[in-house]
Image (tube, coloured by chain):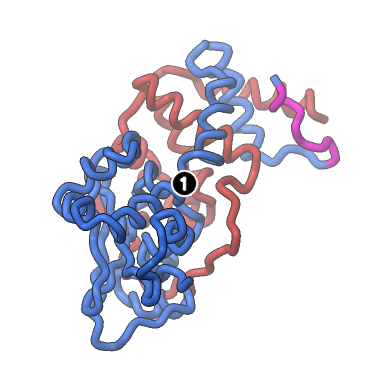
Chain colours: A blue, B red
Amino acid sequence: MAHDHDHPHNKPLSEVELRVKALESVLTEKKLIDPDAIDLIVENYETKIGPRNGAKVVAKAWTDPEFKKRLLENATDAIKELGYSGVQGEDMLVVENTNSIHNMVVCTLCSCYPWPTLGLPPVWYKAAPYRAKVVKDPRGVLDDFGVSIPEDTEIRVWDSNAELRYLVLPKRPDGTDGMSEEDLMDLVTRDSMIGTGLAASR
Amino acid sequence: MNGVHDLGGMDGLGPVIAEQNEPVFHDEWEKRMMGMFVSCFAGGHYNVDEFRHAIERMDPAHYLETSYYEHWLTSLETLLTEKGVVTQAELDERKKHIAMEES
C-alpha cells in the first residue's frame, strides 16, 4: 500500500497522525474499509468534485433563461440535469444575487456545504470566526474578504443544515454580453457562489 | 442542544482569514480521514446527524482548539467504539505498535 510510507522519516508522527493510522489499520483489518477505495474517494474530491461544477451551473443560468428559471424553482433537479448530485447535495436551493439583494451562505453549527457543486469547503468556512461573525456582521465579513457591497443592498445570510444546502447565483458581470458559457465559467469563483465574493470581471 | 458548536453571533473570535489558493487537503492524514468518513458512512455505521452530534459532544475547549478533521477523527472514534465496531483497547494497541515501527 503506497500510502504507508509517503512521508519522510525525519519527524515522528503526531498524535493525530497516529490515531488516524491506527483507525485505518484496524478498520482495514476488519475489512470494514478498503484503502484503495479511500484513495479513489480522495482523488475524486481533489480532481473532479469542486467549484468548476458550480461554475458550470452558474454560467448556464447566465446564458440559458429557461435553465435559470428551472434552477430557481427546483435547484436540485436543475443541477442534476448537469450531472451533479449525491452526497451532501441531496436537496439544494439556489439564491440569486440582484442589484438589491446580496446572498451569503454559512453553516453556523458545523460545515454543511453543497459538495457536488462546490467540492469540500475551505478551512475558513468551517472555522469559528466565519460561522460566528457572518450572521451578525455580514458586511464586516465582506470587509475581511475585501468585498464591498453598496449600502442600500440588502444582505441575506442563509444558514445551511443537513437537509438543505445553498448555492448563490452571483450577478453576471457587466460587459460580458457576448461571452460563451465556457468563457463565463472562468469568471465564477468559488467565493462568488458562497457569497463572500463576486464574480470576476472579464 | 446548546453547546460551543452553536457559534452563530458569538463575539471575539477574530477576523475571517482565507488562505489563498488553498489545497483541498492540507495533510496526508486529512485525506485518510475524509475517505474513512465516507467509507464508514457508506457502510451504514452512522448517519450524518449522529456524526455531527458526536462532534457536538466534544469537550468545548478541545472543540475550539482542534482542526476540523480532528473533529471528524474524534467523532469517528467515538461512534465506532460506542457501537462496538472497534474497541478503544484495539486502537490504543495499534497506535503503540505503529509508533514503535515508525521510530
Residue at (51, 56) in percent of width and height: A123
Residue B90 visible, this angle: no
Image coordinates for residue A22, horizontal then vertical, percent: 61, 25
List x then y, in percent, for residue A12.
78, 39
Please identify the residue farthest to the right as the structure is shown: A10
Q: In this view, does A178 lie above or below A2?
A: below
Question: Which of the image's four quarters has the C terminus of chain B?
Answer: top right
Q: In terms of depth relative to the viewer, which is nearer, A35 or A118?
A: A118
Kind of residue at disc 1: Gly
The percent coordinates of residue A131 (x first, y second) are 37, 63
Of A200 and A15, nearer the camera is A200
Write the residue at 44% across / 58% down: A190
Quarter assignment of residue B19? bottom right
- The vertical placement of A41 against B14, above or below, is above
Callout 1: SS: loop
> B15 or B102, which is in the foreground?
B15
Asked which quadrant contains residue A192, the reply is: bottom left
Badge 1: chain ID: A
- Residue most toward the bottom? A151
Q: Mark 1 points at which residue?
A: A50
- Residue B96 % position (x, y): 69, 25
Outermost residue, front side: A178
Q: In this rendering, would A32 be left or right of B3?
A: right
A29 drawn magenta:
no
Q: Residue drawn at (38%, 46%), measured in percent from left and top? A: A117
Judging depth in this view, the residue of B15 and A185 nearest the camera is: A185
Asked if residue B73 lies left or right of residue A113, the reply is right
The magenta span reads: A2-10
